[in-house]
Image (tube, rainbow, N blue to C red):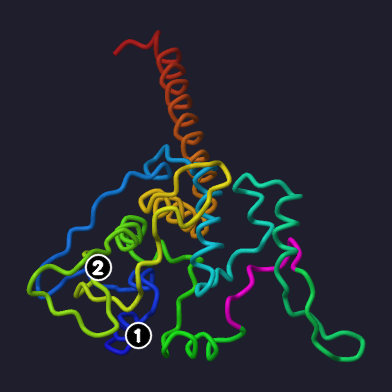
């Protein structure tokens, strides 16, 4: 367990903090994680398609430099509102390794809809070498790694600030209000105007954090909307069935003297 926690604390990217299995604490002080209101929360929650598409853009332009999402295929992007033509064109911008060919050799080709998201590094050893020995975690189910995963990742991405007076920051570390111990190796990765949204939404840090968390939440649980819709239909069915059952009972026993 200690080895696991040490690895998490050393990860270059702040989202790795989600892997912590204990409540965020610093010097014995509990860290309050703000409750962010997301469209997908609650019994009637749905994923905002505009936010999903913006969140994917943030992941592609910022997070994918270090983080993989190997549980997703490019065809899954059809579910967030992108057209097949858009997804095919997007996939074709990436080169993936395939093969062997007739000569028994591996080769590169443009990605297809059926291919999984391309990894930023060819293997884990290369990933560690590029990140001072730390292995950036796959983000496919990162939001599900803790009960308040969405709120925590959002807080982490927006929690960078200058350290308070008297706080000693170690070399190579950055201050984050919501990271355990408040010292994190990952620098602030989101800056105002960093991403130019296709829909012209202003790319504030808060907006980018909300959008990318929405995308990560969808990636971790894409069937959530269908499951909730099914639950609502079942509840309505049971209510109607209960009413009909009661009406039949009243009808059958109407002439019976009690």
| Rendered image: mark on residue 7 | 1
Q: Which quarter shows the N terminus?
A: bottom left
Looking at the image, which is closer to me, 160 or 257? 160
On the picture, is 242 further left or further right than 179? Answer: right
Which mark sits nearer the N-terminus, 2 or 1?
Answer: 1
Q: Work out which residue is located at the far right of the displayed protein and give it.
A: 102
Residue at 59% x, 48% y: name it. Answer: 80
Q: Work out which residue is located at the far left of the displayed protein and give it.
A: 166
Residue 67 x %, y %: 50, 72
Residue 154 x %, y %: 34, 57
On the picture, is 222 further left or further right than 246? Answer: right
Mark 2: give few (<14), some (14-19) or many (20+) Cα within 10 Å. Answer: many
Q: Is residue 116 magenta?
A: yes
Residue 240 x %, y %: 47, 24
Q: Is residue 98 magenta?
A: no
Figure check: 94 above or below 151: below
Q: Which residue, given by chain and number where applicable, does mark 2 sit on?
A: 176
Q: Which residues are magenta?
A: 111-121
Figure check: 65 above or below 4: above
Looking at the image, which is closer to me, 242 or 13? 13
Closer to the eye: label 2 or 1: 2
Rounded to the nearest angstrom, the CA distance separating label 2 from label 1 is: 18 Å
Q: Work out which residue is located at the far front of the displayed protein and give it.
A: 193
Q: Secondary structure at mark 2?
A: loop
């Amino acid at each position: 367990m200690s080895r696991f926690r040490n690895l998490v604390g050393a990860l270059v990217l702040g989202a790795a903090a989600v892997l912590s299995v204990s409540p965020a604490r610093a010097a014995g002080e509990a860290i309050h994680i703000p409750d962010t209101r997301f469209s997908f929360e609650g019994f009637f929650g749905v994923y905002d398609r505009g936010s999903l598409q913006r969140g994917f853009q943030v992941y592609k332009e910022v997070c994918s430099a270090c983080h993989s999402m190997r549980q997703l295929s490019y065809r899954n992007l059809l579910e967030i509102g992108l057209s097949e033509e858009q997804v095919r064109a997007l996939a074709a911008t990436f080169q993936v390794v395939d093969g062997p060919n007739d000569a028994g050799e591996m080769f590169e080709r443009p990605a297809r809809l059926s291919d999984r998201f391309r990894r930023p590094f060819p293997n884990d050893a290369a990933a560690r070498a590029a990140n001072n020995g730390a292995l950036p975690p796959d983000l496919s189910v990162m939001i599900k790694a803790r009960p308040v995963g969405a709120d925590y990742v959002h807080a982490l991405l927006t929690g960078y600030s200058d350290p308070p007076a008297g706080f000693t920051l170690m070399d190579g570390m950055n201050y984050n209000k919501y990271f355990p111990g408040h010292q994190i190796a990952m620098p602030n990765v989101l800056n105002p105007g960093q991403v130019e949204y296709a829909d012209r939404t202003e790319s504030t840090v808060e907006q980018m954090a909300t959008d990318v968390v929405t995308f990560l939440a969808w990636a971790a649980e894409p069937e959530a909307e269908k499951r909730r819709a099914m639950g609502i239909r079942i509840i309505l069915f049971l209510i109607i069935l209960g009413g009909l059952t009661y009406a039949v009972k009243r009808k059958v026993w109407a002439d019976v003297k009690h």
